[in-house]
Amino acid sequence: MATTNQTKFAEKMRESLEQAQERLSGIEDEAQKVFQEIIERSKTSRKEMAKMMARLNPDKATVKQWQGKAKNVSADLVHRFEELRSRAITYAGVASRSQVDALAKDLDKLSRKLDKLMGAKKKA
């Protein structure tokens, strides 16, 4: 009887172990499938990331081209602004900076001449 009980127990244990192995095998297969899916997704993600980076990081020639265009536009805007400012000053009847500088130089020359003349009159 003891051997019969031991045999039954051994058979139950063997059956339980076989069932556990089958479950583990199924879990292992499922884990392998999930792992493969993750690998495929990561490959797709890497490709998408590379595409985005290519869009965000244009080649050096394109960057230089856009920099040149920006400099040209900036220079053109400065030139146009200066023209507009000059026209506004002329329209308002106000002297330009160069005209004011020229007048200041002329006044300085005249002041020196007057100082010389006044100095000559005081001596006389």
Image (cartoon, rainbow, N blue to C red):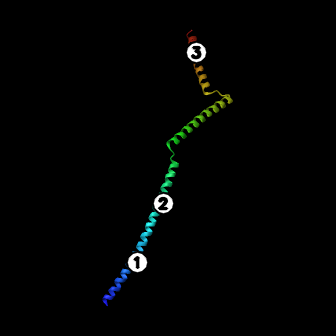
Identify the residue at image location x=60%, y=27%.
97
Q: Which mark is residue 121?
A: none
Q: Which residue matches tag 3?
A: 113
Farthest residue, direction bottom: 1
In the image, is 116 to the left or to the right of 91?
left
Residue 63: image location, x then y, percent: 52, 42
Where in the figure is residue 37, as x and y percent of width and height? 47, 63
| Quarter of the picture holding the N terminus | bottom left
Q: CA distance from mark 3 to mark 2?
A: 90 Å
Classify residue 32 as left or right of residue 52.
Answer: left
N-terminal of the pair, mark 3 or mark 2, is 2
Which quarter of the figure has residue 24?
Answer: bottom left
Q: Residue at coordinates 41% horizontally, 72% vertically from top-left?
A: 25
What amino acid type should be assigned to the residue bearing mark 1? Gln
- Residue on which disc 1 sits: 19
* Up-down relation of residue 106 to residue 49 (above or below): above
Residue 41 numbered mark, or none:
2
Give the residue type that dot 3 points to: Lys
Tag 2 and tag 1, C-beta contact below 8 Å: no
Mark 3 crowdedness (10 Å alpha carbons): few <14, some 14-19, many ≥20: few
Viewer-nearest of labels 3 and 2? Answer: 2
Q: CA distance from mark 2 to mark 1?
A: 33 Å
Which secondary structure lies at badge 3?
helix
Of residues 124 and 37, the one drawn nearer to the viewer in this rendering: 37
